[in-house]
Image (cartoon, rainbow, N blue to C red):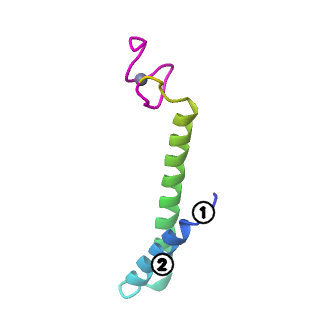
Amino acid sequence: MRFERRDGILVAGVGLLAAGMVPFVAPAYAIAIAAAVFLGIKWYSERRQRDVLSQIGKGVCAECGSAITGAECPQCGDSGA
Ligand SMILES: [Zn+2]
């Protein structure tokens, strides 16, 4: 798991979330819930990033510019040429 500069914003966000929960739940629970939210968002954003990178890796259509996800462009197919 890599940490980036924008993770600071995420840490601040879940920190505020934990602080907001403290009046209602035990601080240990607030920290545990905030940590779970942080890890969930990290996991989701890393998965999203991997999906985007794998699509870019297959190239972009020269005709319409959409990302090629399969063997050929999903927009043009083989009729575009
Ligand atoms: Zn195309």
Q: Which residue is label 2 attached to?
A: 15
Tell me, yes or no, whether the highlighted magenta stretch contains residue 67. Answer: yes
Tally the marks.
2
What kind of residue is marked 2?
A: Gly
What kind of residue is marked 1?
A: Glu
**Where, quadrant-wise, is the C terminus in this rendering?**
top left
Q: Which residue is label 1 attached to?
A: 4
| Residue lying farthest to the right in this orientation | 2
Q: Residue at x 53, y 55 (%)?
A: 43
Q: Residue at x 58, y 33 (%)?
A: 57
Question: Regarding mark 2 in the picture, which secondary structure is present there?
Answer: helix
Main SS, magenta residues: loop
Tell me, yes or no, whether the highlighted magenta stretch contains residue 46. Answer: no
Q: Provide residue 1's location: percent of width, then percent of height.
A: 63, 57
Highlighted range, magenta:
64-81
Q: Nearer the viewer, mark 2 or mark 1?
A: 1
Q: Is residue 14 above or below residue 66?
A: below
